[in-house]
Amino acid sequence: MIVADVIVDLQYGDCGKGKVAHYLSNKNSYTHVLRYNGGCNAGHTIFHKGQKFITHHIPAGVFFGIRSVIGAGCVLDPDQFVREIKMLEDGGVRTKGKIFIARNAHVITDAHKAEDKKRGGKIGTTGRGNGPAYRDKYGRTGVRAEQIARLKPYLVDLYREWYSGKPVKILAEGAQGFGLDIDWGDYPFVTSSHCTIAGALLNGLPANAVRHVWGVAKIYETYVGSKKFQPKGTVFNRIGDIGEEFGSTTGRRRQCNWMDMQTLERAIHINGVTHLVFNKVDVLREVGEWALIDRKKVVRFKSEREMKDFVIKRLASLGLKRNRIYFSESKERI
Ligand code: IMP
Ligand code: MG
């Protein structure tokens, strides 16, 4: 039997999926944690036993000794992968026999990275070779993990992993977010993979395995890339400063805006969200302004309570129960 809980980001990435993955891995008895899309363009900031880690490829399960699998929907940079294992080991995390790569995951080559650095500027990519690696995958000229000798010790066959006959309970952890999804994001200002629940299923999971879908959002929005996103007004720079909104992969300043209700609604519908976490509520509290965008208009609130009530009421109309909506602070767990 397979059961899967899936984590999806409902905005433009950087909403705190790593934190939710870390929390759920600790709380539930998962047999596997699966990274289901993206490459080392992602950066997951995780606080573990008081120590800060930034992972790019390896799922959060590794912090708890759970089998951590980089899935077939991902593209992998072998150098970065090896560096990350060393970083974890140096930080006291035992990784031996815990980290695996789907043999049919694709590889980011040096040529992919060089091309992305040269041509990725128009979109404002992370320059990590993600787009060229996926292009070659779909162009059927790509390189799979199973072709790389030094990855051999880590390879698994996802079919055997899921369908061995033993009960399997998977936490599926995504990268990037709905607004960056290749199909549903603001094309061409998107990443090259599937950041929705569909992206998780692409890793050999049957649809009826899905139990909970954890949507992760921030109480405001951020975006990194070359399109103009941040409106005029000093409040958005304040949000960025107080929220420490700098990319964990590239260090770039993230553009900020109020949370857009329609982006959220679309992402909730398309992902089938059952649980929702709003992160970084303390940032708006410190900024001292409460607002969001609804039907292209800025709606302002007198207090935190008023804004939360508005959001909860709207989400109820989408079928999300109050006791499945969490408002969380920057460093706090859910
Ligand atoms: P790429 O994924 O590196 O090709 O970049 C495409 C777009 O997605 C750019 O706007 C990147 O800044 C953005 N992006 C990619 N990965 C992440 C992420 O993990 N968090 C936030 N933005 C990302
Ligand atoms: Mg990130």
Image (cartoon, grey):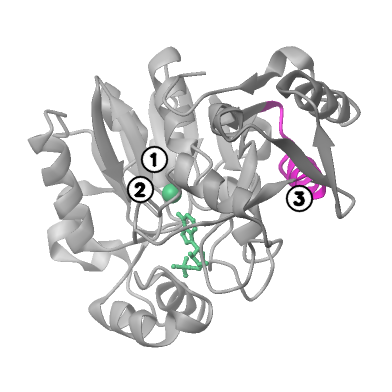
Q: Residue at 91% across / 28% down in the picture? A: 317
Q: Main secondary structure of the magenta part?
A: helix
Q: Amino acid at mark 2?
A: Asp
User: Upstream in the sequence, badge 2 or badge 3?
Assistant: 2
Helix, strand or loop status at disc 1: helix
Helix, strand or loop status at disc 2: loop
Q: Which mark is residue 160?
A: 1
Q: Residue at 71% across / 27% down in the picture? A: 274
**Left or right of residue 73: residue 41:** left
Q: Looking at the image, can residue 250 be seen?
A: yes
> In this rendering, which labeled residue sits more in front, label 3 or label 1?
3
Q: Quadrant of residue 89?
A: top left
For the N terminus, the image quarter is top right
User: Upstream in the sequence, badge 3 or badge 1?
Assistant: 1
Q: CA distance from mark 1 to mark 2?
A: 5 Å
Q: Amino acid at mark 1?
A: Arg
Q: Look at mark 3 in the image and give the residue it sits on.
A: 263
Residue numbers of the magenta segment: 260-275
Q: Residue at 45% across / 20% down in the picture? A: 332
Q: Nearer the viewer, residue 34 or 45?
A: 45
Q: Look at mark 2 in the image and give the residue it sits on.
A: 157
Q: Is residue 117 above or below residue 305?
A: below
Mark 2 and mark 1 in contact (Cβ < 8 Å)?
A: yes
Mark 2 crowdedness (10 Å alpha carbons): few <14, some 14-19, many ≥20: some
Q: Is residue 267 magenta?
A: yes
Q: Residue at 64% across / 50% down in the picture? A: 198
Q: Is residue 132 above or below residue 182?
A: below
Helix, strand or loop status at disc 3: helix
Q: Which mark is residue 192?
A: none
Does mark 1 have its CB less than 8 Å from ligand 1? no
**Left or right of residue 151: residue 255:** right
Q: Amino acid at mark 3?
A: Thr
